[in-house]
Image (spheres, rainbow, N blue to C red):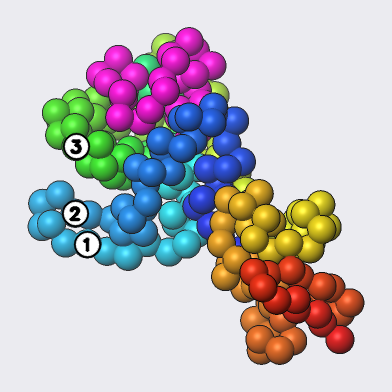
Amino acid sequence: MYVHYDYRYVIACSTMGREMRREFRNLVRGKVRVTCDRRTQTVTPVSAEGQCRRIAELLEGFEALRSSGFALQSPWNFKTKHLRFLIDRWSTQQMTREERAEQYEHWCQFLLWIRKQQLISLLNDLMRTLNSTGTNGSRPGMHAVAYARPVIPILTREKIMEVLDDQRGSLTRAACALRTSTRFIYEVLGEGQPPEKQLPPGLTILTAGSVLTAD
């Protein structure tokens, strides 16, 4: 099965409020595709799957904050109390050092995006303490729960066909509903085939000023 990773679709599938999703999408646009090394200032490209993994991890944290009574309306409002809450939550989760390091990097990049260097210093201190508590990263004396990576919503051919049917074949409306682009929809539908063979047989797609029909 051909799948397509699109961080915008991950945001669209989030249970966060509309305003928060909009603010978050505006924040990560142009930033999530790279990782910045704070010491060397070098920039490294991030794969599409890696982008989705980062966004899913961050959104899972914001959803945990919301379910615990923190009414954040914008990622720019992230403060010390929110970071401390997340660290306390992570301290109850059994993670490998590799998983902990990956989680740290996701949130460190987020703090760079919102330009809160002081929170990066706090994150470093708290994570250092957490990593020194034991092999699984959980605090002694606390009931540890199993850690599972957040599920990444992915665009599939079946999902796109379902939305296209709902949108009466309108490619533009389908892309809007899925919070992605028409180019990505073509990519998923094509499954790597040449452009003239990208549409499923019998499918008519409406585009601006034209109609595309597969044989």
Instruction: Please identify the residue farthest to the left as the structure is shown.
Output: 40
Where does label 1 land, which residue? Answer: 43
Res 55 quadrant in image: top left
- Say which element carries label 2: loop
188 versus 103 height, above or below: below
User: Counting residues from the N terminus, which is met first, the one under dot 3 or under dot 1?
Assistant: 1
Q: Which mark is residue 115?
A: 3
**Rendering coords of residue 167 (x, y %):** 77, 54
Chief SS of the magenta region: helix
Whether pointer 3 and pointer 2 mark residues with C-beta atoms closer than 8 Å, the reply is no
Q: Residue at x 50, y 23 (%)?
A: 64
Q: Which mark is residue 16?
A: none
Can you tell which mark lies on residue 37? 2
Distance between the alpha carbons at the discs numbered 3 and 2 = 14 Å
Q: Residue at x 47, y 62 (%)?
A: 48
Q: Residues within 10 Å of mark 1 (few under 14, many from 20)?
A: few
Badge 1 vs badge 2, beta-carbon distance below 8 Å:
yes
What distance separates the C-alpha of mark 3 from that of mark 1? 16 Å
Judge whether residue 158 can be spotted in this image: no
The residue under label 2 is which amino acid type? Asp
Question: Which of the image's four quarters has the C terminus?
Answer: bottom right
Which residue is at a point 62% across and 73% down the rendered structure image? 187
Magenta-highlighted residues:
59-83
